[in-house]
Amino acid sequence: MKILVCITHVPDTVSKITFSDNNTRLNPAGIQFIIGPYDDYALARAVEIKEANGAQVTVLNVGKADTEPTIRKALAIGADDAVRIDVEPQDAFQVARLIADYVKANPFDLVLMGRESIDYNGGLVHGLVGELLGWPSVSPVMKLDLNGTTATMAKEVEGGKEYVELTLPFVAGCQEPIAEWKIPNMRGIMSARTKPLQVLADTGAALSSEVTSFDLPPAKSAVKIIPSDAAEQLINLLHTEAKVI
Amino acid sequence: MKTLVFVEFEAGKVKKSALEAICFGRQIAAGPVAVVAAAPAGTDFAPLGAYGVDQVLHIADPGFDMPEAQPLATALAQAASQLGADAILLPKTSLTDATAPRLAAKLGAAVASNVMAIVDATPGNFTVKRSVFTGKAFAQTRLAGGKVVLTIKKNSIDVAEGNASAVSVETFAPSIPASDHAVKRISVEKATGQVLLPDAEIVVSGGRGMKGPENWGLIQDLADALGAATGCSKPVSDMDWRPHHEHVGQTGIKVSPNLYIAVGISGAIQHVAGINSSKVIVAINKDPEAPIFKVADYGIVGDAFEVLPKLTAAVKNLN
Ligand SMILES: Cc1cc2nc3c(=O)[nH]c(=O)nc-3n(C[C@H](O)[C@H](O)[C@H](O)COP(=O)(O)OP(=O)(O)OC[C@H]3O[C@@H](n4cnc5c(N)ncnc54)[C@H](O)[C@@H]3O)c2cc1C
């Protein structure tokens, strides 16, 4: 059983986001980069499957050399080997084409990734990869159990969940509580240094979109505090001033 | 461009998010908008005419009641080619999140999700504004090529009527290959009779400050009085005080209601990421230093257990 886990390299969730180059690029100064939290769930589930049933877990990242510490962390968590496709990711279609081309050349039984990245929040790559490979894709997956080549999954739907069944191969976009995030231990960190990390060249995947500029939301005005002994005033303000009730 | 909008109905009425997508559609092409709808036989589509809809492709097949992404993508691709549509708009839901990319790949269209505004609808320079970095920033994104697929973020536009049009309805029977039915539904667990969080205009949300699941009646009472949905912070769903589909934030549901009331929630950056496109935010917290007050429009510094019943009573008085 071969599992591919696609990970993003994104700003930590507590990061303050600013932009440079005339608001066309994320300013990386002072930002700690992490494995995308949703991708981290996908990785944790892949490692659990490997521990329970045996599997080869490969992590893939589309990114430049600065993402390698993030990839090493995924190896420390329990992936067996890694692939970095040496391209600056700019567009979901571009990333999906690169992943799909890789999977066509290197067969896998299962492709897992996060439901979305927390930078572009596209949430498109799993569906694009599925369609490009002609495989089913399911997202957002909260539970994934394998029994031979049959998977039972729970995915989130508005106001609840839906249980589905399908057979390998397929693509899944993952979210909690599919697994608990894994924290690498010392042994994992040591062994990650020597696990194979293959770097592949750009195959010239076309972009179908580009960000022309970023901007930040306007600063919020100060909060209006209502005394707690006159709580009912809040309801009047929401009715007459904010007009939201 | 010719615009096609995917429209969902609920209890015989068109969903508000669908009307929002139709309003976006009118910004793309001056002419009327076509829609494709999966709805029970006998659904009345005439009211859509007021919003500038002239054509309906009606999928009456009950198999499309609650479709999976693959057959829906195939159906929408066939509808788009039948009508010659080159801009396909879907309200953003967990279903359309999974459908839009497959549809785009089938059509060879550029795709953008989480769209909040159409900046430029000129083909070749088609540009949208998207919410990125989980609501911490926006990105103007230019889409290449002649065809686009967009998912529309909820509550990004005020619904307004358009040039009224007569509505012609045509039954549409897409041909779905067996391979599209690879994902087989076993069962569905859905909260019933409640306002659904992603659709809600008002959300009352509780955090760890509520102390335990046994106190959620106070949250529910205020939500019921307001006709609101209930939400919660991540630790609350992690501890199983509340179901996962109520978890709001960076790693949960992103909401954009008119009013978000955060009760006993500290306002961690990951929670705020899921609520910062709400129109009005109210914070109720006993700690005046809680970061939630930095993002709130209105606040009460006080004990939730005393404040909530007063608010519920005041709402009932209002009604
Ligand atoms: C990668 C990552 C992703 C995350 N994603 C999310 C996410 O999606 N959503 C999310 O919510 N969190 C998320 N978190 C967790 C987040 O950092 C916070 O831990 C969490 O939001 C805190 O929840 P809380 O506000 O309910 O609890 P606390 O931070 O414990 O706050 C409780 C608040 O209640 C107040 N309080 C206590 N008693 C009362 C009372 N009687 N009356 C009124 N107020 C009272 C306190 O003053 C306090 O401000 C994430 C964390 C990480 C690391």
Image: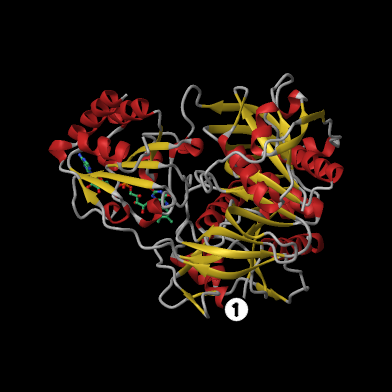
The quadrant the C terminus of chain A occupies is: top left
Figure disc tally: 1
Foreground of the two, B222 or B243: B222
Task: List x then y, in percent, for residue A16.
Answer: 40, 67
Residue B149 drawn above or below residue A29: above
Percent of width and height locating residue A176: 50, 46
Compared across the picture, whether A34 is left or right of B95 comes to: left
Q: Name the residue carrying label 1.
A: A65
Of residues A56 and B305, which is closer to you in this image?
Answer: B305
Left or right of B141 on screen, residue A22: left
Direction top: furthest residue:
B42
Q: Quadrant of residue A80?
A: bottom right
Q: Secondary structure at mark 1?
A: helix
Q: Residue at point 44% right, 51% down?
A: B277
Q: Is residue A28 above or below residue B318?
A: below
Disc 1 marks a residue whose amino acid type is: Ala
| Chain containing the residue with disc 1 | A
